[in-house]
Image: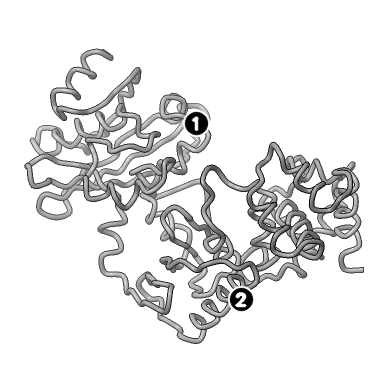
Amino acid sequence: MKYLLLFFCIVYFKTAVIIGQNIDPLFSARVDTSKSEIREISKLFKCYLNSRPDSAYQNPNWNQLDYDKYLRQEDNKLDLSGNFIFFGLNAQQFFDYYKPFVLQIDSIESNLYEIKTLYATEQPEREVIAITMHHARRDQSGDFKLENYRNYYTRNWKRVQHEFIEYVLAPGIEFNKDEANKAVSFCKYVANKFDIQILPFTYYVTSNTNELGRLFNFDYWLFGITGLSSLDLREVYTTYQNLNFPHEFVHILFPLRSKGFAPKMVNEGLATWLGGPAFNQTFEEALENVRADLIKFNNVTFERIRNQEIRNSYDSNILYVTGAVLCKLAYEKGGKNAIMQLWNSDDSNLNKTMESIFNKPYDKIGADIMNILKQAGK
């Protein structure tokens, strides 16, 4: 079966690259393959699932117009949902656990079809992690190619350019110039504080996590994200209908590293110290809440928080606020240079970086941070 599928995809798409995969999705009775276009698209989607969708490359099953926009960095995938569902897993591992079940392939316009796919474990658990939506559009050569749902979904959303921020507003959300001015002022404050050049970015403003999910090809997602940013794409996203989101702005303002990310404690700690851990909450407010949270745990240490052995069930505030205290102390010790040292570190050398900044042993630095956390609110 694997070799038959490999042969078909190479013949059908001419240059498709498929190595060692045999993903055979199921199709619901609603997918009427007696219709030639739906049959063609079902084969396209099957080939796509077998063409390393977890990898960042110019996939021949995909609309070439998306290449320049979504392949800006080496880790970016053409399929916006792929940056979530393949995080930490390769395609074969993901599809072995979450079986793809194509619910529908429906025409929505001439030469444009919507593909909706359920990813769930088999019985008895039946855990659904996602329902994705992709579009298939016929190109100039007459072949159908896949593309991100966002292209169609946001076609009528209002766009407002305000200095270096392009706001993209979901239906029902109004542009508020006062809030936009606050956003610009905050960004300029951070840029001046750390001598950062502000690069233009796009800010998608939505009303809820479902609306946000559709920007990443999800009709349903288990992740339930309320705010995030993409340095690669220069984009910020929110579900709070807010035009000013300091935490996410910090993420988009700090420079893109040549490879990888800063340690999570630093990355999120910096955004929490300057912009609060979430929308409409300050660092100081969160610091008091974390002190109350830590009372619930035994043997609380800086290292166990860093490794996320100590964490709340439904948020990451303990890690974020601990990282914020680290960043605040580093800035008080060494100014912007100390912050950039932390930013350019990684998990393997963060210990030594901290020791260099504070000129004391790592465990003593951790103890100092814990003392601040335990004294918060007193």
Disc number for residue 89: 1
Circle 2: element type: helix
**Mark 1 crowd level (few <14, some 14–19, many ≥20, 10 Å Cα):** few
Q: Nearer the viewer, residue 125 or 180?
A: 180
Disc nearer the start of the sequence (1/2): 1
The secondary element bearing badge 1 is classed as loop
Q: Is residue 111 above or below residue 244?
A: above
Task: Give percent across and percent down for residue 280.
Answer: 63, 72
On residue 97, the disc is none
Mark 1 belongs to which amino acid? Answer: Leu
Left/right placement of residue 361 relative to residue 132 reads right
Residue under the image location 25 percent in, 58 percent down: 152
Q: Which mark's residue is nearer the viewer, 1 or 2? A: 2
Q: Is residue 288 left or right of residue 273?
A: right
Image coordinates for residue 63, horizontal then vertical, percent = 21, 45
Left of 182 or right of it: where is 131?
A: left
Question: Could one spot residue 98 in this view of the protein?
Answer: yes
Q: Residue furthest bottom?
A: 178
Q: Which mark is residue 189?
A: 2
At which x and y percent is residue 1? 26, 13
